[in-house]
Image: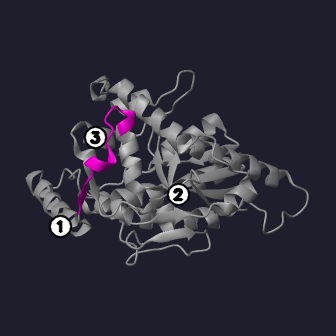
Amino acid sequence: MTSIQKVNRVDGIKYIEGSLTSRVDVLQAIQEIKPRIIFHTASPKLMVQANTRQLYTEVNVNGTKLLLECIKEVGVTKALIYTSSSSVIHNNTTDLVNVTEDLPLCFEPEQTEYYTHTKAVAEQIIVSANKQNGLLTTIIRASMLFGEGDATSTPQMVENARAGRAKFQIGSGTNLFDFKYIGNTAYAHVLAAKALLREAAATELVPEDSKVNGEAFFITNDDPWPFGDYTRAIGAAAGYPVEKENIWVVSATVYYAFAILLEWGVWVLSLGRKESIINRRMAKYLTMTRTFDISKAKKRLGYRPQVSMQEGIQRAVDFYVACHPESKNDT
């Protein structure tokens, strides 16, 4: 078990270790717990390494099918909430401006990330299982997550700031981006679960424009920030602020070319086992606009962010620094 798995464990909670790709493990867990509600949050980390396509298919697609088969066999679960990605309607290349759930799912070859392709396929599987065998399903599409226990973006941004790299800005820095604090994400899942249980118990048909079952919902902090402001806020919370006059602007084209060179260099030297910290995916996200209209979640789930961007950033950094005190600048 890795250190991040240890710190993400909560005292007093029972954990069952197993694999979503193992019928024995999944069936045994459902038979033992007999859950009325299941939150399907399992997914491999987004990465670019050998054999990851097979891993994404086995977990995101086949694992989801297996979970539904086991739910049907045990027959006690009434609500299933699937954690998807806001990128399932996006080719990860073009800008998104206040988009809604009305956009269609995006698959290969238009979809440039195979991970996201498999999340979109899993969404189809989840929707097809809705109202089958007494089960109601819904989908929560997460935008870029941050918060306590974050093992990806927060650690990287804190360490970049510590190394003095937070002063570099890729492109104009004006592109808006929707982020989401992890606690707000959990809150949205709970709201969705309660809504599904209400609909399962309803004696009358739920109006089409109000129902939650069979639907997908974008969830954000409802407060888009320029990407550069976000990265510098992470650094500042760790004690490494950057004044505006000290920002160095780097051309997006130059950075992208540099990222390609580093990607291939790390891949060759590690024989495909490691991924460069600086990569093309990061270059795209640093310069594109990605904002979402969450009116549907507000209306049907009653969702409102409970934790602001600034508070969420401080919580995320405080958690990381508590685990890595050497990263905090106290001067």
Q: Please report whichever mark, 2 or 1, sits nearer to the chain's N-terminal start.
A: 2
Locate residue 106, reporting x and y percent. 47, 74
Q: Please report whichever mark, 3 or 2, sits nearer to the chain's N-terminal start.
A: 2
- Specify whether 106 is left or right of 321: right
Residue 43, can we see it? Answer: yes
Report the magenta residues as a range.
236-250
For mark 2, what is the residue?
Answer: 84
Numbered marks: total? 3
- At x 47%, y 64%, the residue is 290
Examine the rendered structure and indicate whether residue 197 appears above or below residue 108.
Answer: above
As measured in the structure, the alpha-carbon distance from the residue carrying label 3 to the one carrying label 1 is 22 Å
Cβ atoms under marks 3 and 1 closer than 8 Å: no
Please identify the quadrant where the N terminus is shown: top left
Locate residue 137, reporting x and y percent. 67, 57
For mark 3, what is the residue?
Answer: 161
- Disc 2 marks a residue whose amino acid type is Ser
- Element on which disc 2 rests: strand
In the image, is residue 13 part of the stretch drawn in magenta? no
- At x 33%, y 49%, the residue is 244
- Disc 3 marks a residue whose amino acid type is Ala
In this view, the mark in front (3 or 2)? 3
In the image, is residue 239 part of the stretch drawn in magenta? yes
Q: Please report whichever mark, 3 or 1, sits nearer to the chain's N-terminal start.
A: 3
Cβ atoms under marks 3 and 2 closer than 8 Å: no
Please identify the quadrant where the C terminus is shown: top left
For mark 1, what is the residue?
Answer: 257
- Specify whether 45 is left or right of 99: left
As measured in the structure, the alpha-carbon distance from the residue carrying label 2 to the one carrying label 1 is 31 Å
- Element on which disc 3 rests: helix
